[in-house]
Amino acid sequence: MNAGNPMMYVGAVGLVFIGLLIVIAKRNLIKIIIGLSIMDTGVNLLLIAIGYIQNRTAPIITATHADTAKMVDPVPQALVLTAIVIGLGVTALALALAIKVYEHYKTLDTRKIRGLKW
Amino acid sequence: MKAVLGFAALSLIAAVLAISLSQVPFGVDRMEVARYYLENGASDTGAANLVTSVVLNYRALDTLGEVTVLFIASLGVGAFLALRRRGEGSLPPASLIVRRGSQFLFPLILIFGAYIFLHGHLTPGGGFQGGAVIASAFLLMFLGQYEYSLSHRPLSITESLAGLTFVIVGLIGIAAGGYFLSNFLPKGSLLSLFSAGVIPILYVAIGFKVGAELAGIVAAMLGPRGEE
């Protein structure tokens, strides 16, 4: 297993596409936001998978685990830490917009909201 | 029809992505900069958690940007949801067990969140995670106590003070070390609580800031509640 197993990539990209399909196909605004969130998770998983190195552990030094040659790449993990926070901000803002849309149109169905669906 | 078109477009993108990702081998060591961070992170920064050493020492300026993004998101949520009327339907009050249980758990969750952000340089976790846990304690109070409400002022004061702390620590870094957010405190011994220089200070600031912001977002989404 030197070249490694591409299933991690397939799973991560699969999540991105499940999310994208939800965003395109669903009519309910809450479901579209859930799709965005799933896409976000897929991208994070892809970054972490790219940073993974076979047979190595988390980049945290402990008393029993101090050999830095046996740790995975910390850079994608730091990047994903940022990406999760940004994703949270996006989700919160999208939900706030959905609340306002519901208050204005009394529906979350994108077909009934004029000027939203092409 | 639209779904079929969308599915076809997605398949096309997926094929392109699969071809390009097949050039990226899974699970091999490929980053020069990662090797540098792994080998020198602990001695450069004094943080045992090397992800933290990247987030709050090598790339601390980016983290300031990230905190700003979260701040703007919470600002946007507040701006959208500030002037809401009270909802027509009223929820029935929660049962005695839920009310007392949430009151009992609230301080414990706060302590757990504080533990997570105080130990961000030693164990998995940090300011963002600890702040999220603290906000979840407030969410529990909102769900468990019908008349519970957060006043806006203490939240915004906490948030502003925490953000100011981050920037002031960075400015002291300019005075002491020559560049923004340079480490001016002793690194201490690895694996002890008071180590890693400014990282624990920054993470405590981030923990308070994120906790206040997320609690504010939750409060804004739930809308006005409690007694008039």
Image (tube, grey):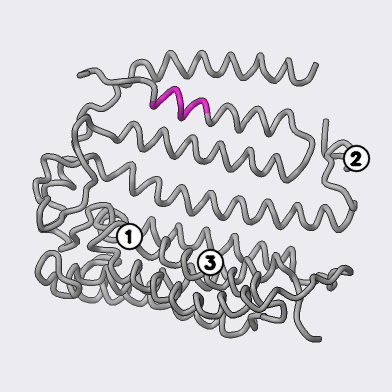
Left or right: A82 in relation to A59: right
Q: Secondary structure at mark 3?
A: helix
The residue range painted magenta reads: A8-14
Q: Position of residue A87 (x, y in %)?
A: 53, 49
Which amino acid is tagged 1? Ala
Subunit of mark 2?
A
Q: Residue at x 31, y 20 (%)?
A: A5
Q: Is residue A88 above or below residue A109?
A: below
Which amino acid is tagged 2? Lys
Q: Position of residue A58 (x, y in %)?
A: 24, 45
Q: Residue at x 19, y 61 (%)?
A: B47
Q: Which mark is residue A112?
A: 2
Q: Which mark is residue B60?
A: 1
Q: Is residue A42 above or below residue B28?
A: below
Q: Position of residue A56 (x, y in %)?
A: 19, 37
* Pair 2/1: label in front: 2
Left or right: A25 in relation to A87: right
Same subunit under labels 2 and 1?
Answer: no
Q: Secondary structure at mark 2?
A: loop
Same subunit under labels 1 and 3?
Answer: yes
Quadrant where the image shows the C terminus of chain A: top right
The disc, 1 or 3, on the residue closer to the chain's N-terminal end is 1
CA distance for labels 2 and 1: 46 Å
Q: Is residue A92 above or below residue B104?
A: above
User: In front: A21, or B96?
Assistant: B96
Task: Name the residue tied to disc 3.
Answer: B136
